[in-house]
Every structure is written in C-alpha cells, then in structure tokens.
Amino acid sequence: MKKNLLVYCLVFQHFLCAQAPGIQPSGAGDDALREIIRAAYRREPADLELAYGRDRMVHGGLSLEELGREFRSLAASAYRIQELVTDQTGQPPSVEETGGLLHRFEVAGWNMNRMKRILRENERYQVHQAELRIRAIYREELLREPSDKEIAGRVEPIRSGALRDRNLRRELRDTLEYRRRETRETIAALYRDLLGRAPSELEQSVWTKQLLEEGLSLRRARRTLMQSEERKIFLAEKRIHEAYERALKREVRPEEIETHLDVVVERGFSVRQIEKALKLGPEFLEVRVASAFERVLIRPPDEQELAKFVSRLQEQGWGNFRLRREIRDWALALQSQTL
C-alpha cells in the first residue's frame, strides 16, 4: 500500500489524543526534536507531534534517539493496520478506524491475529469475502467477471449462508450462457482433434445452434467431421509429414505436399507406403550416403563424392553396412595415394 503521510498525521493525532488527552499543540520550537521527527517521517513535524515529543522527553525520560524509534514504530504500526484492514475488507480504513486500532495495538496490546479475528466479525469484511467468492465462481464457471448487479443480488445470500458455493455453481451451469460456452469449447476441441485447426466464427455459430437448439447429438457432430473431406486431407498431410521425417530426415515442403496429396487421399496410402515410395527416389540415396560419410569420416560428402556414391549405390544396391565399408576403403586408398 502506498504510505500516505497526510493520512498518517491525522491518524497519529487521533492516537495521541486517545492516549494523552491533556497534550496540546505548542508553537515552541525545539530544533533537535524537529530534526528527529523530520528524519523519521521525511516531512515537517506537526505541532501535536512536537508536543507529544516534548511530553515523552520530560515526563517519560526518553532521549531523542529513543523518541525517534518510538515515532518510527508508531508509523510502521499504522501502516500495517491500514494494509491489514484493506486486505481483509477490500477497502482502506478511515482515519478514525486506523486511529482506534492503533490505540488498541499500542496501548491495549492487541496483535495482528487478534485484529484479524475482530475484523472477521465486521460486516464489511463478510461482504468483501462474499464478493470474492462470487467473483471466483463466475471466473471459473463463466470465464468472466460478474457485473455489479450480479454481485449485489448474491452477496447477502452468500454471506448469510442461504446460498452455498456449490448451489451457485449449479445455478450458473444451468444458464444458457454456461451451456453456450461449454458447447463452444467442445466444438473447438473437436476441430483441434479431428481437423488440426480452430473453427471459424461462422462454424462455431452453426454448430452451436445445431447442438443447443436443433437437438444434434455430439456423437453425430463428431461423425460428420470425421467423414468430411477436410478430415481426409488433414490425415493425408499428417502421413506425408511423418513419412518425409522418417525417410528423408527433413520437413516436407508445401509443393511436395501438393504433389502427393491427391494420390494419398484417393488411395489411402499409409505412412509406411509413402515412406517406401520415397526410398525409391534419389533423395533417399543421398540421405544414406551423407549419413554413412558422417559415421565413417565424421564429415559430410562434397558434391562429387555424393554423386559418385549415389551412382554406385543405385548400381550395386548395397546395404548400409556395405556402403560404410566401401566409403572407408575408398578413403584409405585416397590417403595412401596422397602419401
């Protein structure tokens, strides 16, 4: 909480008058006392604070250092009380409330736990807690903040216990707003699972109307999406992506998807079938040669080496073990020639 020194000054005055009504402000100055108060509060001291300080020094026997600590302690206590009340009730306390609690805290020996217990019996605290519960339930069930009117209509029943939290949740779940939100979330989940995308606003509106107003079952809606042409295309694209990743160790390019898509959709090719077809092409042989070079020579082949071993691989049909051996023998022969 932002510490308002002007408010504290008034609170302090209330506290002093409650503790020592006989103290009156005095215009007499005391430079040392003024400096202590100024250092404690970072402002000019009030007359009542000067009078209180003089009284504590004369009758209480306090030194300036001890008096400075006392002023700082009072200010810290007032700020703690203001923070506690604001946290518990949702509203900052008035000057009179802060002064009264400060008097009990410093003079009557109340601690913060006792203040919390007292505040919980306060009507403002109970109203604030009821509002917090209502807001939390609205956020969880309807994903929004309640309006002032909705809060006002439910605060007293929640506070008195006539309306329990679970009953409020049940009440909200019976509303058209909740059912519409839940239906929209279900539609969005279906589109993500079956089509890999979010539905458009038009699709949301159409499906929501059919499910809520026209009696369409969720099972029927799911079956319709599963049998759609878009679903077939979505699955075909997934299979193409997976086959390229497995066979060629790279992402498929958009033009490659377009090349394969019609055939995969029409014939219903599996990932294994697409992968097998890719392995018959020259790119797969290049991947094999590059991988063998990395394992044997710990470097990629240059263009000439790649072309040479791809050509021999096409002619001989070597397996991976034989390919690595041929690369190793070739590299040793090349090294001996250099030497």
Image (cartoon, rainbow, N blue to C red):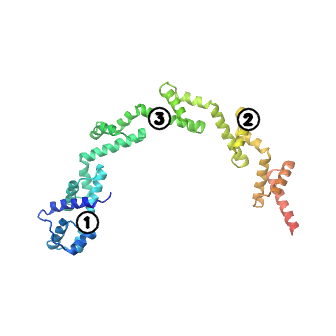
Residue 263: which numbered mark, if any?
2
* Label 3 element class: helix
Query: 10 Å neighbourhood of mark 1: few (<14), some, or many (≥20)?
Result: few
Residue at the image point whose x is 49% and y is 28% from the top: 209
Residue 323: which numbered mark, if any?
none
Query: 10 Å neighbourhood of mark 3: few (<14), some, or many (≥20)?
Result: some
The amino acid type, in three-letter code, at marker 1 is: Ser
Residue 142: image quadrant is top left
Q: Position of residue 24 (x, y in %)?
A: 13, 65
In the foreground, 259 or 288: 259
In the foreground, 88 or 262: 262
The amino acid type, in three-letter code, at marker 3 is: Glu
> How far apart in space, not on screen, are marks 1 and 3 (Cα)?
54 Å
Q: Quadrant of the N terminus?
A: bottom left
> How far apart in space, not on screen, are marks 1 and 2 (Cα)?
82 Å
Q: Earlier in the sequence, mark 1 or mark 2?
A: 1
Residue at the image point whose x is 16% and y is 68% from the top: 51
Residue 33: image quadrant is bottom left
Q: Which residue is mark 1?
A: 73
